[in-house]
Image (cartoon, coloured by chain):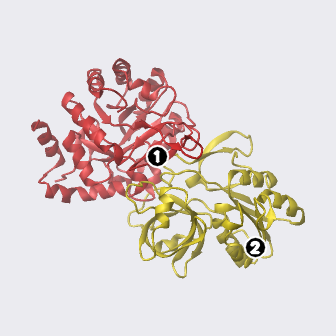
Chain colours: A red, B yellow
Amino acid sequence: MNRLKISLPGLSLKNPIIPASGCFGFGEEYAAYYDLSKLGAIMIKAATLEPREGNPTPRVAETPSGMLNAIGLQNPGLDIIMNEKLPALEAYDVPIIANVAGSSVEDYVAVCARIGDAPNVKAIELNISCPNVKSGGIAFGTDKKVAADLTYKVKEVAKVPVYIKLSPNVTDIVPIAKEIEVAGADGLTMINTLLGMRIDLTTRQPILANQTGGLSGPAIKPVAIRMIHQVSRAVDIPIIGMGGVYTVDDVLEMYMAGASAVAVGTANFTDPYICPKLVEGLPARMDELGIETLEQLIRDVKEAR
Amino acid sequence: MVFKKGASVLKQEDMLIVQQKMIAPKIFELVLQGELVNEMSTPGQFIHCKPSRTDLLLRRPISLSSIDRENKRCTIIYRVEGDGTKNMSEMVSGETMDVLGPLGSGFPVEEITSNEVVVIVGGGIGIPPLYEVARQAHERGAKVISFLGYASKKVVYYVDEFKKLGDVIVSTDDGSFGEKGHVGMSLDKHLPQIKADAVYACGAKGMLAKVDDVFHDHPRAYISMEERMACGVGACYACVCHVKDEKDQSLSMKKVCDEGPVFKTGEVVL
């Protein structure tokens, strides 16, 4: 029996560990380090309709137990992703969750209509929470009506289940999550990064060329846990939890907050082998905590509420 | 690239710190030992070093300054700039450092043949990777001429090491040692008497721009870029630079960590 398997809309995962979008390129980059088939799924870097150059450098800065990034959704555009990046991942036995971003409703709809044609794309992660681009991104994720409207329009054309990636940069995340559920989302992924800034004392200017960036890493884990806890009580669709996961205990804490699978972002930069290490380490810790299977844990957490 | 089951290329290791010493104010020379050295041969490649403080999440990309495969040792030279490099400088021999690498493309040195004239242009903390270039060029029988620029006499290091491998022209910004002025001024002064078969440069952006200008169409002139990195393996897209297409001059982006850090002159928009 596989104690780690998880069934989610569109996704039959052999384990719950998923490298988070933006932290794992288009997968190939880490193929030199381990067999990507070991992963539950891969959330590839955001796809936009047209190629995007992203922001000027510096694009990253370190913070206590965290980091800021302002990459700005650099990607080669949908055509190259469909014709080169996704086919390259067909060599591995791993479902792909395609992160989709845009600057207009039409962009999002156009990408979502096509990207599910790739045979290994089993779900879409709708990125309405990127804090680092001038138009689009987070603008779609902070207003519940706008978010729900986009969800509805994307659902009409998408050929695979759609998960909406929520922004923590809101006063109350619950009404947004509820509205998105009503609009037909198949699941949620949360949280995206928290908007932050660092200033260089010698230049007296922000370190990032974009001035602000998204904070990730263990520094944001308690925020993620709190928000997943809140949202999982308010909606019935599954949540893929993320935000500062570095250890097996972090993975299980996400489950106890109400997540059904877990994405790992910044930790890949610290340790390129972190994802397979988490997969290998889970069973022993589950034994210690009396957890039979992760699917049972999901049911137990729900029932205990 | 498809990972082949059973294929085990070592990429990460807790390497033993053999020696750590300050060779100029804030500048440290660190000698590491481990199996990872078997993978190292190309100067200009870097290793991605994890500070021991667990709250510092990101690795620090530091160029290899020399490779000693026989003794499974490599040396890096770095300047303390922030928390991570400060933490690294406090690590002592006997401890281990979590190292990923070698990463990046490195300087092409295998094309150097005996009696060729190899020009090295280094500025400040950009000098270290050029030491291994100079060493390998010297080994191949080339005549090495090194232009080394520093801010002032007090931060001069490795001049004697380079002198063992060929001619050295030192300059300091304040004139306290060697020729006065930046390394570009020394280049202007001496280059008319030199016919460079190959050029290798690393240093501040201004210096690289000068080298790129002087050797723009030289077939074997290379510069090494520096940029803030996160992953070091091409996944995060943090460390990008603009490059020009050779034919139509159109611009595109390249990642310094895995498509560089070494580029041909005339390629990067500086």
Contact? badges 1 and 2 (CB < 8 Å): no
Residue positioned most to the left: A304
User: Badge 2 local density, few (<14 within 10 Å), some, or many (20+)?
Assistant: some
Q: Using the numbered discs, state the Cα–Cα distance from disc 1 to disc 2 in whole angstroms.
A: 39 Å
Looking at this view, is B99 or A53 the one in front? B99
Asked if residue A2 is positioned above or below residue A111 in the image, the reply reads below
For residue A116, which numbered disc appears in the image? none
Q: Give the residue type that dot 2 points to.
A: Thr
- Marks 1 and 2 share the same chain: no
User: Residue A39 versus residue B138: which sits nearer the camera?
Assistant: B138
Relative to B112, is A4 above or below? above
**Which type of secondary structure does the marked residue at label 1 adopt?**
loop
* Left or right, A261 with reference to A20: left
Amino acid at pointer 1:
Gly
> Whole-percent x and y of residue A216?
39, 43
Give the side of residue B189 with respect to residue B258, left or right: right
Q: Please name the residue that numbered disc 2 is placed on.
A: B113
Could you tell me which chain the residue with mark 1 belongs to? A
The residue tagged 1 is: A25
Say which of A55 and B117 sits in front: A55
| Residue A108, position as x, y percentages in the image | 44, 26
The residue depicted at 33 percent of the width and 21 percent of the height is A144
Locate residue A63, reporting x and y percent: 43, 48
